[in-house]
Image: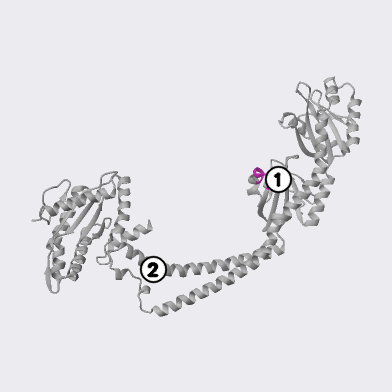
Amino acid sequence: MAFQWHKREICDSMQTLSDLVPPAMKPSRPLSNKAKLITLLWLLLSAGFLATTLVSYFASREAIRESIVATELPLTSDNVYSEIMKDLVRPILISSMMSRDTFLRDWVVGGENDVGQMTRYLSEVMSHYGAFTSFFVSEATNNYYQAGGLLKTVKPEEPRDVWYFRVRGMNEPYEINVDPDLANRDKLTIFINYRVFDYQHRFIGATGVGLTVDAVVKLIDEYQQRYGRGIYFVDASGKIVLTGRDGIAGDKAAHAGIREIDGLRDQADAILKTGQGSFEYRNGGRRHFLNVRYIPELKWQLFVVKQEDKAIAEIQKTLYLNLGLCAGITALALLFVYLTVNRYQNRLEEMATTDSLTGLANRHALELLLDQGVRESARAGAPISAILLDLDRFKELNDSRGHFAGDRVLEGIAAILRKSVRNSDIACRWGGEEFLIILKNTPLQGAADVANTIRARIEKARHEIDGSPVALTASAGVATYRPGESKESFISRADALLYQAKQEGRNRVCSEAIERSVHDA
């Protein structure tokens, strides 16, 4: 659109080629300008090479940061995952086995008569598999059995029993839950709660084992201290279910969920949905690098986070400085290139779109603008008309007075056209002594009136050539664009009417609706 508007300005103002050339482009001091350009290019290239060297140097430093994100944190995740799996996968398998144990199901279906049998069974599970605790909760009696005997009766209104009623209604076969263990002095325990069904697939209770979190917490603390990074586990809702003794990354006031961590809050939903990957966030003015890994066995996500230390912060500061340097050099380069290219581009555009003799748009520009005019006419439903005008017996003038006289006459005709059309209209030199005028939002009769006005002004005009006046007449054909037709057809119809005007005696206007000659009084 900007390019087309430039053409319109040329048509509207009809500036001469000399006026359109910027003063800086006029060849007053070409050698000086060339020397300046060479000097500027040299300075620019020197600065560019210097910047490239600095960027390469700092890029090697940046590799440290990349290694944290791409290598260190994922490696820590892998190591922690391997260690955790040794402690958690086995209890999951044990709980699964208990949920399908025929003794347990037969004992429940048989009426839960001998509590000692269940107690011995749970005790055997603990001793044989090395579990911290084992349990079974009956759906029929709500009794909570543990290796030490009948512990209690679970109740929906008891907050500590909410887990059972949650398990009873869930679709998954099991869950992993971190809760205090009532049978072991409220020691924080990781429970694997497995749903139990009878032989008709009816829910009859929940069973499983628990293990103390001390081993996991110890592992987390060891990694946090050794590598200086935070490690914690998050469930599907975003709740932080397990972390080291000192909380998250040294924050003893451990957060209840990742949505409460500044900087991580905005990314929480995306992280939970993605399940794994590398992320960055700012907390307390410091950048944190985060690696997330999904542990399908636990249905938890393992978060490993490392704070940006002083070395990385210094590298980041230098990186910003380098970016500022590059931005400055780029801005200067763009400025110099713009100033130079813009001058030449204006010159080329002028030469490409302006007739050098008359200052009107040339045929190439007209074809571009006609496309736009036709589209605008179609959108607005407004008529668009064309006047194709030709000077009568112009060749005789050239032959008798010379081409210089002909050029002066063409310049005069261009001046008449400028005064006769609106700013929104398009006037161009179509070729030789032919001129084409596109009238926007103008019906056929209106275009014919404009054509007659132009014809009359040309007839009355006197062009001074070597001190003597020269007069000419003009003939014109007028056509209105028909929806859907091609540009070529549109102009061809105007050309045919121009030919008709010539055949009928010249100095007249012919249109599709007016087939007789029209003269001013």
Residue indicated by mark 2: 344
**Is residue 486 or residue 159 the one in the foreground?**
486
**Residue at left 79%, top 52%?**
246
Query: Is residue 292 left or right of 148 when viewed as pictured?
Result: left
For mark 1, what is the residue?
A: 257
Q: How far apart are marks 2 and 1 (CA)?
A: 62 Å
Instruction: Reply yes or no: does residue 278 show up in magenta.
Output: no
Percent across and percent down for residue 76 are: 76, 52
Q: In which quarter of the image is the N terminus?
A: bottom left
Q: Residue at x 76, y 29 (%)?
A: 156
Which of the two marks, 2 or 1, is nearer to us in this view? 2
Q: State the quadrant of the C terminus.
A: bottom left
Q: Where residue 279 sits in the image (x, y, percent)?
A: 66, 52
Q: Counting other residues with Cα less than 10 Å from the Cα at mark 1, is it few (<14), some (14-19), or many (20 or more)?
A: some
Type of secondary structure dominating the magenta stretch: helix
Indicate the secondary structure of the residue bearing disc 2: helix
Residue 312 visible in the snapshot = yes
Residue beneath the point at 32% across and 60% down: 7
Q: Is mark 1 on a helix, strand or loop?
A: loop
